[in-house]
Image (spheres, rainbow, N blue to C red):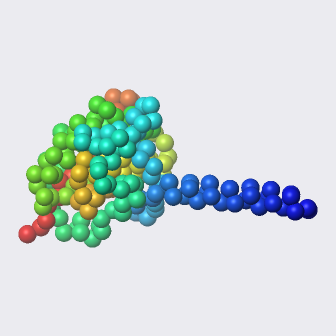
Amino acid sequence: MNRLTASIWLSLGLALIVLLGEGCRRRPTALTYIPGHSRSVTNELAGLMDDAGRAAQPPGSTGTGLKPGATDVGSIPLPDRSRRENMNEDREYFKNQTVYFDFDKSAVRASERGKVQAVAEALKKRPEASVEVEGHCDERGTEEYNRSLGERRALSIREYLILLGISSERIFTVSFGEDKPAVPGHNEAAWSKNRRGEFILLTPKP
């Protein structure tokens, strides 16, 4: 191998290393709790993308989809779940804000974003409170796939709440996959109600 050929191969190798390094930096990971599981997911803000592939921007956000001074929310770790055990839960408080998803999707639909915004406004008025976001799926797909999809849905909502100004330390997530259907049935009428994200209001125990 002459010097010219070796130089070309060396240049190609360095370029490949740079590209791989950039790809790794752009793929932050986040952890969420799945009953009986411990895993991580790659999170690229997919849940906050509109149909054209642009970041869905809540009111007051910048052109990047993030509030001024905010960091990439996908890289923000979830709060310590041991704190969750010392909180009371209210499943009725945000019942009307349940977010519904399209089949096999984790993006928050434009028609559902107002519900997440309402939850954010309520949390701003109650600084002592936190929230848990539950991710759910319909019965189609394998159990493992649906756990992962429920996880992505919960994280998608969490990220939108962060973009709306809610501290990441106040937002817990959990995925139940297909295990807890809201409506029994094996048709689209039932499935459309089971593809959802639910909010649980959490307040400190006395």
On screen, 199 above or below 110?
A: below
Residue 75 x %, y %: 40, 59
Residue 139 x %, y %: 42, 41
Relative horizontal placement of residue 135, taking residue 124 as reference (left or right) = right
Residue drawn 19% across the image and 69% down it? 86
Between 10 and 107, the residue placed more toward the observer is 10
Quarter of the figure with the C terminus: bottom left
Quarter of the figure with the N terminus: bottom right
Relative horizontal placement of residue 31, taking residue 57 as reference (left or right) = right
Residue 51 x %, y %: 42, 31
Of all residues, the one furthest to the left in this rendering is 206
Residue drawn 36% across the image and 47% down it? 156
Residue drawn 45% across the image and 35% down it? 53
Residue drawn 19% across the image and 46% down it? 119
Relative horizontal placement of residue 37, taking residue 1 as reference (left or right) = left
Residue 183 in sight in this render: no
Of all residues, the one furthest to the front in this rendering is 4
